[in-house]
Structures are given as structure tokens and as C-alpha cells.
Amino acid sequence: MPLELICPAGSLVSLKAAIDNGADAVYMGFRDNTNARAFPGLNFDETQAAEGLRYAHDRGRRVLLALNTYPQPDTWSRWTGAIDRAAKLGMDAVILADAGLMRYAVKQHPQLRLHLSVQGSATSYEAVNFYREHFGIQRAVLPRVLSLPQVENVVQHTDVEIELFGFGGLCVMVEGRCLLSSYCTGESPNTAGVCSPPKAVQWTDTPAGLESRLNGVLLDRYGKDEKAGYPTLCKGRFAVGGETYYAIEEPTSLNTLDLLPEMLKIGIAAIKIEGRQRSPAYVAQVTKVWRAAIDSVKKNAAGFKPEPAWQAELNKLSEGQSHTLGAYHRPWK
Amino acid sequence: MNLTLGPLLYYWSRDDVLAFYEEAKSWDVARVYLGESVCSRRHLLRLSDWLALAEQFDAAGKEVVLSSQTLIESESDLKMLRRIVADGRFRVEANEWGAVRLLSEAGVPFVAGHTLNVYNPETLDVLAGLGAKRWLPPVEMSRATLAALLERAPAGMETEVFAYGRLPLAYSARCFTARHYNLPKDDCQFRCLDHPDGLALTTREGEAFLTLNGIQTQSAGVYSLIGELPALRELGIVSLRLSPQSRHMGRVVKSFQAALAGETGAAEQLSRVMPGPAVDGYWHGRAGLEHSTEKNA
């Protein structure tokens, strides 16, 4: 089936919210740095994962496990242990970024379905086909850097199913190739499963305005009437050539509802919603809108038009209350 | 342990590039990485020009490696990659896994670049099986992690470490230099040419933080492992990569050669030609922007 809806499950409550509101599959992580949302209070232990799987499978839906950080030499067994648990629990697929870990998974659990994580940074069909040939991956999640015609070119040259990010936080950088967070804080998505980690964030009220800092580095300063957002490093205001502005990216979210007919046409297998760190209520609302939109575009692609109510709902939930088509739409670049 | 001249990450005029490499022929480096690895729009040197330079360095007795592009987006990017692999005269540095596929299919040995994200010996072993003879750890890797990895590295694999220069930290579809000038990427007017060492990004309180280099984001701090040579030797590192800067690169090479020869004052010489504050936090397992002398003092 094209255009499956893949929703974030940061907790059991979120998982149920996603399933109840129409997700075809959810993705989750274990409670450690083996996944790229290693936040305190988030993710699943083995018992919860088993319960989540039961809940999803009873309703004919699937659960994918994100193991998409890069295993470190001293703690290699943490990642292989997670693969073993995934297989034992009956995960429908594991989402991996590291070639060494893929080799382990293929050897030890040949029946386990493998997806290439966005953290694997595969932006061409040559890279996607590399993982297909060597590890038999069934699906690849593409970094949010390609335009739709470039995505189409990938789809046309591979048997691997292609999954795209449709909504939520927007990485401006190629995922897996961004070390800004570790440069500033010592922890990156690749190694620690976090970007701009909460423990490095500091808020200070100053006469000049509310300041957000990451490990002491000033990311932004907000005027009285400005709404302060989470201090993600790439979405701060910096000075370049005497001008202070969002030098890398505005605090905005990705929203690709408008592109659904084209994504259907070019054969995208699945749409991923970002946000395992978001609340169950958020997951419920976003899933509901996207379920309705995907059902609608499949019924009548030519006549598809996002309903104003959907956009209003999604805008309310977006970071900075604004959204962008990102790199899928060339002028963004 | 010898020195390597890394690929030129900035966009300079054709004359400046040729003058830089003319000078480089006299530098005491064992190996030179050539080619455009950052942005496919940069075209003042064509592949044929890079290959001509490669022949000259080869004749001058230096090993040549062609660096491939890190972010592949279009069919024309792939076409360029195939041409580089097909040339066959020189070793190629694979900077993403599409290049790994093409090089392993061609059955030629290659260099595994630092953006392949090799964080453990198992992945390095995968690459060794595909033909990698030399590799670079991710620039964020600490000495301790590298030591643990190398304990189980495949036999015969040569390790090269990024040891000097602004750190290449991130790659994007978006061009941040064009964005600064309110220009679309497709009509960037090649503004990178005006910034031979990138465009400085500071915080709102004037602290140097990052450097914009087209689609690449670098550190503002200049990574330097000149004080870590004993540790690098102990790890069995074969080569140190020095990343080009627009001025005084010859003196950078000289400083590292002096340090390798055990001369005192080499680090002091180097500090005079660095285009920014020194950083080495990554090597010590800390935030990349830190410097050991600040923390250890």
C-alpha cells in the first residue's frame, strides 16, 4: 500500500493515541541512547514495548523500532542486545543507520526486516542500493534535503521502498551528518541520540530580554512580544556580516500536506511524522489530520486540496506556529 | 607519522587555487587530496583541471587522492562521481555510501572519508571488506573512543586523523552563504568567492561560533592536535590531515613538521597563523568548541 502513515510513539500512551487515530505503523525506541530521541522520561522498556506491540498487532498495525544512533566500540553490545530484543519481541522492523549493526542483524536474525534510518544519510539511489545489496534493507527514510524531483529519481532507480518525513521538526542539515550539537555541548544525535540536549539549556531573564543558552553559548534573545521556542541550535539568531537573523533556519516546522498528491504519484511508500518527544495529545491530533488527508488523496488525488481546518489544526501544533515545505520545494534552498 | 593536505573546502578563484597548489608542491606532505567535495555548483576548476593537478603532484612524488562530493543530490552529481571512479588513475576518497558502492563495484582500493560515520570496528570491517585501505574517524570522535575502536581494527587498515583546520560540522541542501545575501541557491552568484575562509557567524554577544561555507557549516574555532602527537603516535595513526586555509598554509605544514621532529616552539609558531581560536574539545571527549588548556589549567 502506498502512503502508509508512520507515527511517533515516545510512550505507551502516545502509541495508543497514534493507533487509535489511524496510524498504519508507529515507531519507538528503547530507553537508552540506541535511538535518536534519547530524552529523559521517553521511550520503552521491554515490558512496555511488548504491550505496545500487542496493542498494535491486535488492531492490525505494525511497530518499528528505531536503533538509529551509531554504536560505540566500548558499548557495542548495547546495540546488538537491542537488536536481539527487537527480534525476540517480534518487532515488525528495525530502523538502523550503522552498516556494522546491519551486518550483525542480517547474520543473527535474517528474518528481521531492516529499514535504513534517515540518520544513515542516504541521499542517492546509489547509496540506498548499497544497503539493499549488502544488507537487504526493505525501506529507506530519506534525509530532508532532496527536492521532490530528486526524490522521484531515487524512487525510479531502486526496489527499496522510500519513506519521507511529512510533518514535524525540520532538520536543515543532512541527518547523520550534523555535528553542531556535539560541537556546542559534547553530545550529538549520532553518538548520544540527542540534539541540543535539555540538560545543556539555560534560560535567563536579563534587562536585554529573555536569553536562551546552550552550554553557555547564546542562541537567542527574545523581546517582550516575542514567543520563545525550544533552543535548537540551528534555529537561533546569530550575527553574520553585521546582520542578526535566523542565519541557518527559522523556528518552523515541516508540513507537506500540499505535496500529498505528488508524493502519491511518484510512489512514496510511507509518510513519517516526526515527534516522539511530543505529547500524546499532539500525536493524536496530528495523526488524525494526516489519516484524513491520506485517505482523501487516495480517494481522489486530482481533486485533493488540504482542508483549511486541517492546516489550521496543524499550524496550531507547529513550532513557531509556521510551516514550510522545506527542501521538497526548491525555493526553500 | 606523515602529513596529508586535505581537500580544499572553500571556493577560490581559479588563479588562487592554482597558485595555492603550485606552492603546495614544495611542502613536506606525503599526500594531497584534490577535487570539489562541498558544492557541485563550484566549477572554476573542472574535473580535467583537478586531474591535471593530480598528475603534477604524482610527478612530484606525492600520493594523490581524489575527494568525492559529500552530499549527492542529483543525477548530475552521480554522473560526476562515476567519472571520478572511472578515471582509475588515482585513489578516491568516498565521502558517502554511494561512492562506496561504485568503488567496491569497480574493485579498486579506496579511502573511507570522515563523513561515512565509522564509529565502531564492525563498520570499519565492512568497509575493509569492500576495499577501504585507509579511513578517517568522524571529526567528533575522541581519543578514548578511537583507541577502543583501533584495538579491534581490521589488519592493515591505515588511520588518518583530521588534525588541523576549521572542523567541517554539517551539510545541508540549503546554501547559507546564498541565504545571507538573500539569493536563491540556484542563483547564488558564487558569493563564496568573496569569503576565502568562509563567512564568520557569531552569537548576538559577539562570540565567534561557526563559519558558513556554502552548504557546509564549519566551526569558528580551529581544531589543532599539534600538542597531541605523542598520543597520536601511540595509537598508531599513520597520517595527520591538515585542512587548507587561504593564507600561511605553508607555515602550518612547517609547524607540524617541526612538531613531528620534536622541535620546541612549533605549537607557538602555529598559533600565529591560525585564522581563529584553537579548539580540541572533541579529542578530549568534550564539547568541540572547548580547548584543553582552558579546562586543564
Image (spheres, helix red, strand yellow):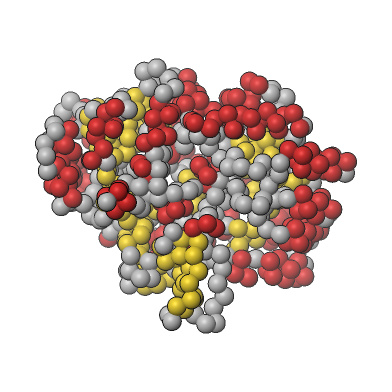
Front-lying residue, B32 or A233? A233
Relative to B163, A253 lies left or right: right
Position above or below: A282 against B142? below
| Residue B264 horizontal/vertical position (percent) | 11, 39
Q: Whole-percent x and y of residue A37?
A: 61, 49
Identify the residue shown where x is 36% and y is 59%: B209
- Say which quadrant the N terminus of chain B sits in: top left
Q: Nearer the viewer, residue A257 or A226?
A: A226
* Residue A119 image point, x, y percent: 55, 43
Q: Quadrant of residue A284?
A: bottom right
The picture places residue B268, in percent across and down from the top left corner, at: 15, 47
Q: Residue at x 41, y 23 (%)?
A: B151
Q: Residue at x 27, y 44 (%)?
A: B224
Q: Residue furthest top?
A: B155
Does residue B134 appear in the picture of this structure? yes
Is residue B291 among what the camera can see? Answer: no
Which residue lies at the image location 63% right of the left edge and 26% below the top edge?
A105
